[in-house]
Image (tube, rainbow, N blue to C red):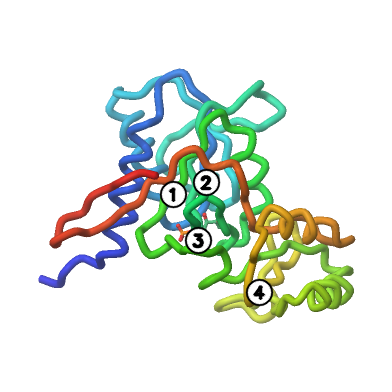
Amino acid sequence: MTAADPVKVMKEEVGKAAAALVKSNSVVGLGTGSTTAYAIQYIGERLKSGELKDIVGVPTSFQAEVLAKQYGIPLTTLDAIAHIDIAIDGADEVDPQKNLIKGGGAAHTREKVVDYLANQFIVVIDAGKLVDKLGSSFAVPVEVIPMAMTPVMNAIKKLGGKPELRMGVRKAGPVITDQGNMVIDVRFDDIPDPVNLEKTLNNIPGVLENGIFVNCADIVLIGEVIDGKPSVRQI
Ligand SMILES: O=C[C@H](O)[C@H](O)[C@H](O)COP(=O)(O)O
């Protein structure tokens, strides 16, 4: 028998813990990525068992929509609801102030809309996503409309960033987002002020949204494996 992949174990454990926080009669923001996928699965299982009743989900991506349908979670749109009670979403980096970099799956634009609207935003990560400073291991994803790609890249270079157009895997050419745009991944040697950088990037004409999320995460659930045993702690 092969040993379970510890990262997968952490993701499943933390996804399950987040799913347990969802209450009946609530509107749930459904995030994107491999960690949130477990939360969606366990929300579906709680619905199926009758433990959870009358919830509707607001998906943050085509991936979340497909998974929600697969696990029997009824869906709605932002036009049909007055609020979101809880959103569950992953992250690529989390700093001690609970600022995030998101967008490893190119879904950060819709995620930002849904996660910021939620009364409670729960972030689900494995312990490897914790960093002392944002940008230390992950580039900042920037969604850009295709005709503005070159001027946006030039503007980013002037800010000291190193932009790289995200290319598809098993697809020739760039990654195309759910909105039909492209993603530029930007490496910064240092991000001393994430609040300011988020605004500065979004002010470049042609940028739709970037993956820096500040002042929005309420709880970060961290999946860990300690002495071979999976556990979840929160900050
Ligand atoms: O665009 C994708 C999202 O921001 C994801 O939530 C993020 O990349 C984390 O994904 P994962 O849980 O697969 O590491």
Badge number at residue 188? 4
Real-space Cα distance between discs 1 and 4? 27 Å
Q: Dot 1: within a 10 Å radius of its alpha carbon, few (fewer than 14), some, or many (20 or more) residues?
A: many
Q: Amino acid at mark 1?
A: Thr
Residue at (59, 41) in percent of width and height:
216
| Residue 15 percent coordinates (x, y) | 36, 46
| Residue 201 percent coordinates (x, y) | 78, 61
Does label 1 point to a residue whose CB lies under 8 Å from ligand 1? yes
Per the image, the residue denoted by label 2 is 31
The C terminus - image quarter = top left
Asked if marks 1 and 4 touch (Cβ < 8 Å), the reply is no
Asked if marks 1 and 3 touch (Cβ < 8 Å), the reply is no
Q: Amino acid at mark 2?
A: Gly
Which circle, 3 or 4, is nearer the viewer? Answer: 4
The N terminus - image quarter = bottom left
Does label 2 point to a residue whose CB lies under 8 Å from ligand 1? yes
Ranked by sequence position, the earlier of labels 3 and 2 is 2
- Height in image: 34 above or below 36? below
| Residue 159 percent coordinates (x, y) | 79, 72
Real-space Cα distance between discs 1 and 3? 15 Å
Left or right for 29, reference 113 = left
Residue at (64, 64) in percent of width and height:
192
Real-space Cα distance between discs 3 and 2? 15 Å
Q: Amino acid at mark 3?
A: Glu
Mark 1 element type: helix
Q: Dot 2: within a 10 Å radius of its alpha carbon, few (fewer than 14), some, or many (20 or more) residues?
A: many
Per the image, the residue denoted by label 3 is 93
Per the image, the residue denoted by label 1 is 36
Ranked by sequence position, the earlier of labels 1 and 3 is 1
Asked if marks 1 and 2 touch (Cβ < 8 Å), the reply is yes
